[in-house]
Amino acid sequence: MSNLSDFPSQLSPKMKMADAINQYHSLLTVLPRLNIPLGFGEKSIEQLCIEHHVSLPLFTLISRVYCQNDYYPTANELQQCKMADILQYLTLSHKDYLENKLPHIEHHLKRLLDPMDKKYSSLITNFYAEFRKEMEKHFQYEEEVIFPYLRQILSEDEAVESATYQKSDFHQQHDDIEDTLNDLTNLLLKYIPGNISPEDRVDMLLDMYALSNDVAKHAMMEDRILVPYIQLLESKRHE
Amino acid sequence: MNKIAIAEPSPMLRNGLAQLLDDIPDVEIVLSTDNLNALNCRISALKPDILIINPLLFEYARRATIRAEYDNLPNLRLVGLITSYIESQHQKQFAGIIELNDDLQRVKSTLNQVISTLNTDNDESDTAPLSDREKEVLICLSKGLKNNEIADKLNISVYTVITHRKNIVRKTGIKSVAALTVYAILNNLIEEKDII
């Protein structure tokens, strides 16, 4: 457990969860996915993890990805986490995007575009719909191809087919999703006339930035944790 | 905004350097890492303009060819972060050298000098609106034309089309053709019925 002392600046298992969240707001989106409810009073990160059956190494890994942009886990740190825990977290994140984050943005978008000429607003609506499809497709690919493949390697089933995914595709899909989100943000920020739903628009953009940030962290989890983990397991198999 | 990546084993040096860079305008650190694996994993995607790298990260036999390791990124400028004796022959491959004893002013002037070599082919400001030619290229893109078709239609080289496309992306901050099409319609450059 020695590496837990490497928590990003002053973030340690003994720290109060409330202090951690006050310092790193983006962790707020992580808690519901780990089933840690708010209202935790003065409890520490460690206490809450034990109480809600969340693995402390997993929480450490996630919070480091969220709080440290240049974080790459070492093989040792990866091995402290159970892959099943990581996959469960990622799957719950997907669910959170599709069931909460995106509908929320859609709600804003609808209100925002309402006063606009239909000719123009339908363009944005269609663009958004494409983005949503792209995201759903990516999640589906992960849940139906990548995650089952990982579970198979983990089960040490000798008959596992060799990797059916391309690491570069995986990176590319993440970049594409982040780019599309960025494009949509710029369209709403820069090119829709200023008199259209000014207040809704600020709310919407704040949500979009929060989503972009979270999606970027999610991609980091997958690029920096999942992919190296797969490689680690594959190399062990070939020993 | 110039993007900088730092690869240096010592956390003290990385953080110290990051603080110095804070004072230089238009500079953003996109990656700061202590190892080559992390660097090489991300560098193609991040496309930094400058890589500040400690040659000691490479084993001795590879130190003479560090520049060649990043041949796939021809626009990347390498700055050597020299913390112990490195042969002068090896130092020549860097666009600039930062030494451990350099004072603040020296580090800044080294970096500014390297930055100045970056922007020579980019004299048009980001804040300029799209030029007429760029608008024409954008209209063609929105109609679904490929680079070579645009080149034929506007009677320019494919290379020029690519340059215009880069400028459009740089100015608007929009990368995908789908979103650029929305941009074109919102700005009345084309009518919706023109799109296939």
Image: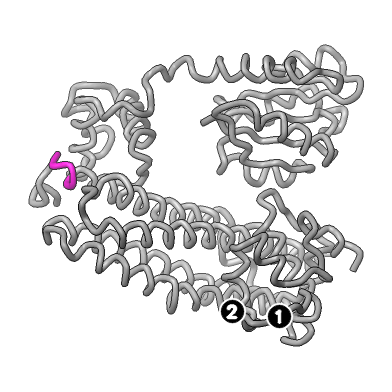
Q: Position of residue A39 (x, y in %)?
A: 64, 82
Q: According to the image, label 2 marks what residue?
A: A32
Whichever of callouts 1 and 2 sits on the residue coming sooner in the sequence is 2
The prevailing secondary structure element of the residues shown in magenta is loop
- For disc 2, the chain is A
Labelled pair 1, 2 in contact (Cβ < 8 Å) = no
Which element is circle 1 on?
loop
> Which numbered disc, 1 or 2, marks the residue closer to the eye?
1
Q: Give the Cα distance between marks 1 and 2.
A: 16 Å
Q: Position of residue B193 (x, y in %)?
A: 8, 51
- Compared across the picture, whether A116 is left or right of A23 comes to left
Which residue extends farthest front? A41
A226, above or below B179, in the image = below
Q: Which mark is residue A41?
A: 1
Q: Quadrant of residue A116?
A: bottom left
Which element is circle 2 on?
helix
B165, above or below A89, in the image = above
Q: Quadrant of residue B3?
A: top right
Residue at (40% x, 56% y) in the render: A181
Write the start and end of the magenta stretch as one range.
B185-189
Amino acid type at image mark 1: Gly
The crowding category of the residue bearing disc 2, from other C-alpha atoms within 10 Å (few below 14, some 14 to 19, many at least 20), is some
- For disc 1, the chain is A
